Amino acid sequence: MREKGLSGAEFRAPYASDPAQSRGRLFDEPESRTRSLYQRDRDRIIHSGAFRRLQYKTQVFVYHEGDHYRTRLTHSLEVAQIARSLSRVLMIDEDLAEALALAHDLGHPPFGHAGEEGLQKVMAPYGGFDHNGQALRLVTHLEARYAGFDGLNLTWETLEGLAKHNGPLIAAKGQTDRLPWAVADYAVQQDLELHTQPGIEAQIAAVADDIAYNTHDVDDGLRAGLFTVDDLADLPLLGPVIGEVSANYKDLDQSRLIHETTRRMIDRMVNDLLTETRARLDVAKPGSAQEIRALPQPVVAMSDEMMASNKVLKGFLFERMYRHYRVNRMTSKARRVVSELFGLFLSDPGCLPSSWRSRAEALEDTARARLVVDYIAGMTDRYALDEHRRLFDLYE
């Protein structure tokens, strides 16, 4: 029996997820006396092998290109900080929002978007590849740590938020043809209500991801020299912020100017988000977490003006950063690495480590391809490069 007061219900909005009212875990197990269910979910995510590997999985730059650029791990920590701060102001469950923020990128393969594009291409004949589906697969199946079950045995609310934090995945209950195969595979085992909106904590984690992503890509792009502060001067949101910093601090060095700009960006987006979300909550007047899920649109959102500014920023980053020739060269290499590893392991599973080889050799076609992609998607940038060199360099 857990100690009283762990749910913190007295400090909770009526539409927040309440661990005391959780739908529980797929596999029954004794709960902690000192931690709520969502605190325990967060802790299991932090202690997972998949979470540790995020340290050497990159966003845009590959790990050897510099120590100061974001990795999936540092990005996830930044998302968690923003999500937790927003949750505290809105009086919803901070621990659930943090758990979802920390877990949202677990399914990403090595080499950021380049690695994902490579796996999507080679997996097209076998059901495709989706990093959100892969994250769900990791926490429900691939993390083999506990004696009584596969995966981490997270609560229903955490699994639901992880699967659909970006919104409903299907239009109607029971529809499966539009689902990523990994999500459809798990939906047979447990109904995550994939046709409804996610809970408010998952919505917070999703928008916190956008806030962190935009600001740290500006930071990384400036530090990498892919564009300059002057290039940003005409962009909405960024231009006024840069002007404000420059006016208040004359002759500020580049590093401090970048930091002052990005932290003000976060502040403005967070405050805009809070204003818009409160307005939507005032209109919807949800009385429970389930009423949040039943709404026709998310309650957590930025204003139309801020969304328009972010769209302009994303367009700028796409042209000046994600398609910069230096990034394109590494992207091309990354796609080639994951494609060649996939082709070799699929055609010759004897090249897989013994624990994976025995399972792969017993499978055929689609099942083998999905096992191979499980192995590759779990690699870090460093391990994928080393494995590729070991397997394709005749002198290695």
Image (cartoon, rainbow, N blue to C red):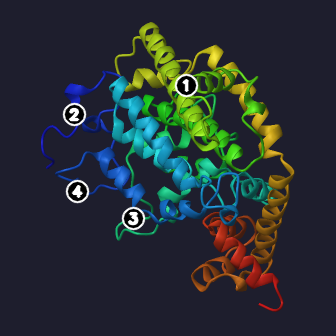
Locate the C terminus by quadrant: bottom right
Q: Mark 3 or 2, which is nearer the eye?
A: 2
Say the numbered circle drawn on residue 269: 1
Q: Are marks 4 and 2 in contact (CB under 8 Å)?
A: no
Residue 59: horizontal and vertical position, in percent?
A: 65, 52
Instruction: Compute the Cα span from label 3 to label 4.
Output: 14 Å
- Of pointers 2 and 1, the one earlier in the residue sequence: 2
Q: Residues within 10 Å of mark 1 (few under 14, many from 20)?
A: many
Relative depth, front residue between 379 and 284: 379
Q: Residues within 10 Å of mark 2 (few under 14, many from 20)?
A: few
Q: Is residue 299 visible?
A: no
Pointer 4 with pointer 1, Cβ within 8 A: no
Quarter of the image holding residue 372?
bottom right
| SS of the residue under disc 1 | helix
Q: Secondary structure at mark 3?
A: loop
Q: How many marks?
A: 4
Q: Residue at x 70, y 61 (%)?
A: 62
The amino acid type, in three-letter code, at marker 1 is: Met
Q: Where's residue 302, x and y in %?
A: 57, 20
Instruction: Check disc 4: other Cα within 10 Å, few if <14, some if 14-19, many if 20+.
Output: few
Task: Tell me, for residue 30, which label it has, or none.
Answer: 4
Circle 2: residue type: Gly
Q: Secondary structure at mark 4?
A: loop
Q: Is residue 382 left or right of residue 318?
A: left
Which residue in the protein does label 2 denote? 8
Q: Amino acid at mark 3?
A: Phe
* Image-based side of 193 in relation to 9, left or right: right
